[in-house]
Amino acid sequence: MDPHLLRTFVAVAECGSFSAAADRLGYTQSAVSQHIAALEHDLGTTLLRRRPVAPTPPGERLLDHAGAILLRLDAARADVHRAIGEPPGTLTIAASPLAAGGGRLAEALTAVRRNSPGTAVSLTVDGREAVTHGVAAGEFQLGLIDGVAAPTDPLRLSDLGSLRTTAVAHEDLVVALSTNHPLARRRRVDLHDLVDARWIDAPDTAAALPDLRAATETDGIRAAFNYAGTDLRALLALIAAGHGLAVLPASAATSVSGIAVVPLGAPRLVHRTELLHGHLDGSRAAELVTALTAPANRRTD
Amino acid sequence: MDPHLLRTFVAVAECGSFSAAADRLGYTQSAVSQHIAALEHDLGTTLLRRRPVAPTPPGERLLDHAGAILLRLDAARADVHRAIGEPPGTLTIAASPLAAGGGRLAEALTAVRRNSPGTAVSLTVDGREAVTHGVAAGEFQLGLIDGVAAPTDPLRLSDLGSLRTTAVAHEDLVVALSTNHPLARRRRVDLHDLVDARWIDAPDTAAALPDLRAATETDGIRAAFNYAGTDLRALLALIAAGHGLAVLPASAATSVSGIAVVPLGAPRLVHRTELLHGHLDGSRAAELVTALTAPANRRTD
DNA sequence: CCACGTCGATCAGTATTGCTTATCCGCAGT
DNA sequence: ACTGCGGATAAGCAATACTGATCGACGTGG
């Protein structure tokens, strides 16, 4: 089970075609065919049904593992390189918009720079998926991701290979809607009041709809409008213009003109931001972790 | 980063010698030397200091990942084989002694066999480390492990590669000691009363001492007697004979002659047993999971 | 202080592997 | 039936991955 073989296997499964995978990987179609044949011979099963190309049940099993293995391989390489290449005074962070924008990260970074003046910081803001993937692959030392969940549950995170998570902050949720929306003057709104409402699906800048669905066990939460960016102001503009509503952490939507904010009642959910990291002993990242998780300034509303 | 190279790398790191690793792996010393050279060239660093052989800092980083990657590779292979080889009516379970002995597992298994009469069951009882490793490597479909932790914390588990955990039961803890121990007539005992007591370190059949240390943040919990088996009765005999004391879940030690049982006071800890599994959709293992986690008969004392 | 033994590095030689190009074969659409 | 598409197969060649032999450095005992 050479990683190269696994790599072409997932490529083929994703492309749904041997030749397309060959193109993507810079091989010839013949090589790809031989790779798959080798894998199937090694494991003693057929992994892909041909024409059309689709994984067999054992192939599905392998796919589950293959991605994680390749990711971890990348993480290992990145970790080793970091152990030598980088001077220890470097800090590479990725964060989802709602995790980065709260101000806590900025404060914690000033704490770090005060303690360790020479620190070089690189901050990337991107979608939740990209952040976890980047941290898992070792591209970033630290990740900050946000999401909604029941108060006792942790975030539902995909493929954290070797990663650890620690809670950083949690906050109440509100429904953000246009000021002339019928619900705008309510004291509170329950989530099932919003089934069949006009949702904006903004997976990176608001509560992700699948999380809300999971919490309510309804699948009536559907969106006709999709916002794919990572800029919160653009989403707020859409909401103010009446294109739909979204669920946000309270601090993200208050006192924005044209936006009304209504606390979310049942079910009880919180906006939670968690820290994602691999190994970080001795690095400057450890300082940031303590600054972020220091209970003194943890927000507990 | 060929897995073969990683494999010999961890072998060399464990053996502390190129030639010994070569013996273990069935290679020549020359081959091992070339493997390490190839890895070091690929990663651009020296990974091992020679004479004596010890990992450099980047080597340590790599070691952290290498074991997990190889484990996961095994798990992938085992998973694929299970998807074809085994008839779906097979169930292979591993459990730590205190997780298997409680009777809940036996009850759940009768439920499964009643629902699905033809099920073939294989149960292995072994230490916690062996159980998690075996499940991670795909050797078992399901693992049941126990441990102690604060009521809100999950168990501190090592290297779960792709594994998911679900809580199965929790139970109060007691101190088990000989009936003529000075503390035997106490109504309750706090853990710091037991610092510098005569502990029996029985990592697989009682609360593991590192867990207790972690909970109390004292390191005064030291044992002069080590019991390495997985048979609870042998440990109880040692305790009854006055060789020392141990912390056990309440049900494991009550009404055993020669043993006094005193509830554990502060800090508040529970004995928790958790289920460990990889992918199990459609398999007979899924039935057992629901039988074990059915809230109807969950023990909540 | 020197000789020797141990252990890793290196070299040369060889069998195997892993690509490529070229060709073949089964299936779908017309 | 023809043809185009997509995967399988064959042959050849370059790079790889071992083995066995040798070298060189270090540590040890006389």
Image (cartoon, coloured by chain):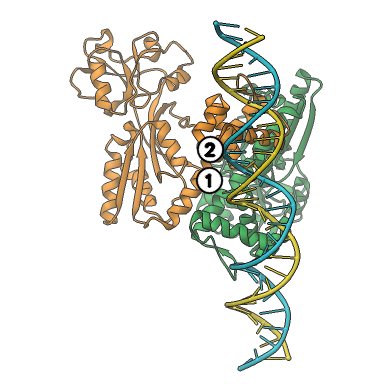
Chain colours: A orange, B green, C cyan, D yellow
What amino acid does circle 1 point to? Ala
Q: Is residue B188 visible?
A: no
Q: Residue B149 in the image: x percent, y percent? A: 56, 42
Say which quadrant the N terminus of chain A sits in: top right
Which element is circle 2 on? Answer: loop
Observer-nearest residue: B175 or A188? A188
Mark 2 or mark 1, earlier in chain: 2
Q: The numbered mark 2 sits on a residue in which chain?
A: B
Q: Quadrant of residue B293?
A: top right
**Of residues A174 and A100, which is closer to you in this image?**
A100
Image marks 2 and 1: residues in contact by CB distance under 8 Å: no
Q: Position of residue B240 (x, y in %)?
A: 75, 52
Q: Are marks 2 and 1 on the same chain?
A: yes
Is B246 left, or right, of B266 in this rendering?
A: right
Describe residue B218's horizontal placement relative to residue B109 as left or right: left
Q: Amino acid at mark 2?
A: Pro
Please rate how many residues cluster around mark 2, counting C-alpha atoms within 10 Å: few if below 14, some from 14 to 19, many from 20: some
Number of labelled discs? Answer: 2
Q: Pick the residue in front: A78 or B244.
A: A78
The reply to whether residue A201 is visible in this rendering is yes
Residue under label 1: B266
Which element is circle 1 on? loop
Mark linked to residue A251: none
- Give the CA distance from mark 2 to mark 1: 12 Å
Seen in the picture, residue B163 relative to C15 is either above or below; the reply is above
Residue drawn at the location 36% of the way across and 43% of the way down: A93
Dot 1 alpha-carbon crowd within 10 angstroms: few under 14, some 14 to 19, many 20 or more: few
Residue B151 badge: 2
Comparing B211 with A4, the one in front is A4
